């Protein structure tokens, strides 16, 4: 509980530790260390290596999603993407309105920016996760297919995300009805989107939800070194390779590459922010610094740290930690949205279904 006599930035910050790690997470940790980590350590981030990584990680067929989810390809402002509607999102559609295409301006929505180190990933790789987030938030989710190397590096992803956000505003979607979320590099992009919107004097979204965000591409935070031998999913050496590719020759200390380093006046414009991270992640301090800086700038922030949880807690469906993380996501979105349009907060049963519910082949 926050002390009422504490400094203002401390009263605005809620920090929660979730642990100890469940048996499922400890098993997952050992499996990833044995199977995934050796592959990730040795991957070369040459143009050929990047294309190969994109090919082998991107599903070519149908992707399992939470049963009852609807998926619809779209293009906004010239940027491809897809609308993902899990059952609770469809349930929130007003009577007489077809749950397809862009939601009506009066309906709240979520913009999702996928992770992948700014070198791989797509709406397809993250469709399962986005379907589960759509379910706990009750929101139609727009998953953005922003440009990637070797064809494009930063700031191209920011340009794409900002173009989509501008399009939504121009189409009549009020910022207080838009939540922006992202994981890993997508967390970087979600934060950058809000900062660039503030710089352009656009209204910022209602909330940011950042899942294991990567916010400092200079790789200078303590956990980048301290957790290098503990993280079972992201090798520090591989992250450095991704940072060099993503920056595209721009100094990583430039805040447009590392949004954690943005000027104070832009941070003062940010909306309420939820951050989740694992205690042994190399990116732990990225998330911690974001949450604390948001609070120091005068805005409410929540930081959830999960004991020994691998990268992006809600990604690992079937673990108790994923259930807790997903319910926190749903509750935060509901609290941040305009009250007259916010879906109900998820129940424990909703979160359980999102974390462990049966998957089905998606209809896209």
Image: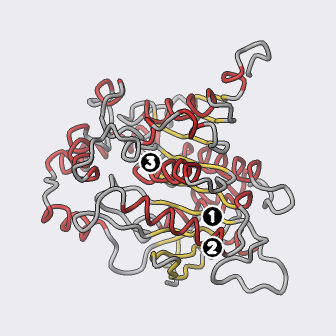
Q: Can you say whether 341 is above or below 31 in the image?
A: below
Q: Which residue is mark 1?
A: 134
N-term-proximal mark, 1 vs 2: 2
Q: Can you say whether 244 is above or below 358 in the image?
A: above
| Residue 223 image offset from top left, x and y in percent | 36, 27
Dot 3, crowdedness within 10 Å: few (<14), some or many (≥20)?
many
N-term-proximal mark, 3 vs 2: 2
Specify whether residue 315 is in view.
no
| Residue 112 image offset from top left, x and y in percent | 53, 61
Residue 15, quarter of picture = top right
Outermost residue, top direction?
5
Q: Are marks 1 and 3 in contact (CB under 8 Å)?
A: no
- Specify the label residue 188 is tagged with: 3
Q: Which residue is mark 2?
A: 85
The CA span between labels 1 and 2 is 6 Å
Residue under the image location 68 percent in, 35 percent down: 299
Q: Nearer the viewer, residue 194 or 82?
A: 194
- Left or right of 95 in this view: 286: left
Residue 87, quarter of picture = bottom right
Dot 2: element? strand
- Left or right of 302 in this view: 287: left
Dot 3: element? helix
Q: Nearer the viewer, residue 217 or 71?
A: 217
Residue under the image location 15 percent in, 63 percent down: 47
Residue under the image location 64 percent in, 60 percent down: 353
Specify whether residue 131 is in view.
yes
Dot 2, crowdedness within 10 Å: few (<14), some or many (≥20)?
many
Q: Are marks 1 and 2 in contact (CB under 8 Å)?
A: yes
Residue under the image location 60 percent in, 59 percent down: 133
N-term-proximal mark, 1 vs 3: 1
- Specify the label residue 340 is tagged with: none
Q: Are marks 3 and 2 in contact (CB under 8 Å)?
A: no
């Amino acid at each position: 509980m926050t002390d009422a006599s504490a400094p203002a930035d401390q009263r605005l910050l809620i920090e929660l530790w979730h642990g100890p790690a469940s048996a499922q997470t400890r098993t997952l940790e050992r499996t990833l260390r044995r199977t995934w980590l050796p592959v990730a350590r040795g991957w070369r981030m040459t143009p050929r290596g990047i294309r190969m990584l994109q090919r082998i990680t991107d599903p070519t067929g149908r992707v399992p999603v939470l049963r009852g989810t609807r998926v619809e390809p779209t293009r906004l402002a010239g940027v491809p993407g897809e609308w993902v509607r899990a059952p609770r999102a469809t349930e929130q559609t007003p009577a007489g309105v077809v749950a397809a295409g862009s939601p009506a301006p009066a309906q709240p929505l979520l913009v999702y920016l996928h992770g992948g180190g700014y070198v791989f990933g797509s709406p397809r790789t993250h469709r399962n996760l986005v379907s589960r987030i759509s379910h706990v938030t009750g929101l139609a989710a727009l998953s953005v297919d922003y440009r990637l190397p070797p064809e494009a590096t930063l700031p191209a992803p920011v340009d794409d995300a900002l173009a989509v956000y501008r399009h939504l505003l121009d189409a009549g979607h009020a910022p207080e009805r838009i939540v922006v979320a992202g994981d890993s590099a997508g967390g970087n992009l979600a934060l950058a989107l809000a900062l660039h919107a503030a710089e352009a004097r656009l209204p910022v979204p209602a909330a940011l939800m950042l899942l294991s965000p990567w916010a400092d591409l200079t790789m200078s935070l303590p956990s980048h070194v301290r957790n290098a031998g503990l993280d079972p999913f992201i090798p520090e050496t591989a992250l450095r390779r991704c940072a060099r590719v993503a920056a595209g020759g721009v100094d990583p200390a430039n805040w447009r590459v590392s949004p954690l380093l943005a000027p104070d006046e832009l941070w003062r414009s940010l909306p309420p922010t939820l951050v989740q991270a694992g205690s042994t992640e190399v990116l732990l301090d990225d998330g911690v610094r974001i949450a604390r800086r948001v609070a120091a700038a005068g805005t409410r922030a929540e930081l959830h740290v999960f004991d020994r949880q691998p990268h992006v807690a809600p990604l690992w469906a079937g673990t108790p930690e994923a259930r807790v993380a997903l319910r926190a996501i749903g509750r935060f979105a509901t609290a941040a949205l305009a009250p007259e349009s916010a879906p109900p907060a998820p129940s424990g049963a909703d979160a359980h279904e999102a974390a462990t519910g049966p998957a089905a082949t998606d209809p896209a």
